Image (cartoon, rainbow, N blue to C red):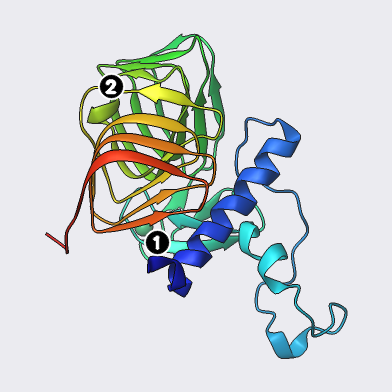
Amino acid sequence: MAAKDPLVIDGFASVQAVRHSGKNKRDPKYGQSKTALPAAGEKAGTKKKVGPKVKIGHTVVPDVFEIVCYECGYTFPLRGRIQKTYCPKCRKTLVANEQIIESDWSGRVKTIGTVQVRNGGSLTKAHVVVGNLILDGRIEDSTTKICGRLELGSNASGDIAKIDTRDILIRADTKLSYRSKLRCENLIVEGNFRGTVEVSGLVTVMPGAFLQGRVKATRLLLHEGGGLKATVKIAGKT
Ligand SMILES: [Zn+2]
């Protein structure tokens, strides 16, 4: 099945690694890593210190971030950590602010980094263009464009279905039930989610996760130990 697909495994492995690095630090700057990196252009043949063994998959993957230019949509890798950079295609400067919102907030933010709305925080009449949004609070009357991933916590509420996002992650400790249909390219369930989802790409249910409701997707990857109790429709590209 899909589990044999190396592309699927790669995506899974990188998600896992990123999640752990964020969790260990209990740091809101999810996904950021301070780990030192090999030089950007380094190829397998030039590695002297590491030794030619099996180390590769674990160390390198989490430190390469996929950045989506919020000006032109071009996607490119960024190594090390997310920082101010410029788009290799349209040459615009891309800001990489990280923001934590713990109360009612209604400003504007544009960043390739991560904005986090914590429990008790809310976005109201906000304009948000971000790389990633971690939502564990409320969102209302806002325009939101997420180039990467929307991560939902147990306290996520409001107009979640109106958020324009590429991917959605149900976080590991989350228990969330949501009425309106959520749409995205890829859905990763690490926690417990009940709702209706329409996914143009891959749905992944991780070990220990539980997905209930109605699911429409192109591909579904159910890991051992993951639960699924849903009306599922797997169809080719529509
Ligand atoms: Zn660009």
- Farthest residue toward the left? 238
Q: Nearer the viewer, residue 154 or 27?
A: 154
Q: Which residue is mark 1?
A: 75
* Position of residue 177 measured from the top left corner of the image (x, y, whole percent): 34, 22
- Farthest residue toward the right? 49
Q: Is residue 88 above or below residue 182?
A: below
Q: Is residue 52 left or right of residue 115?
A: right
Question: Where on the picture, by quarter, is residue 218?
Answer: bottom left
What residue lies at 69% left-to-right and 45% top-to-bottom? 21
* Position of residue 181 measured from the top left corner of the image (x, y, whole percent): 20, 32
The quarter of the rendering in which ligand 1 is drawn is: bottom left
Q: Is residue 155 above or below residue 22?
A: above
Q: Residues within 10 Å of mark 1 (few under 14, many from 20)?
A: some
Q: Which residue is mark 2?
A: 142
Q: Is residue 131 above or below residue 64?
A: above
What residue lies at 54% left-to-right and 46% top-to-bottom? 207
Question: Where on the picture, by quarter, is residue 97?
Answer: top right
Q: Amino acid at mark 1?
A: Thr
What residue lies at 54% left-to-right and 13% top-to-bottom? 102
Q: Quadrant of the C terminus?
A: bottom left
Q: Is residue 145 visible?
A: yes
Q: Is residue 65 visible?
A: no
What residue lies at 63% left-to-right and 30% top-to-bottom? 28
Q: How many marks?
A: 2
Q: CA distance from mark 2 to mark 1?
A: 25 Å
* Position of residue 157 measured from the top left corner of the image (x, y, whole percent): 35, 17
Q: Amino acid at mark 2?
A: Ser
Question: Where on the picture, by quarter, is residue 145?
Answer: top left
Element at badge 2?
loop
Q: Quick one: label 2 or label 1, which is nearer the N terminus?
A: 1
Q: Residues within 10 Å of mark 2 (few under 14, many from 20)?
A: some
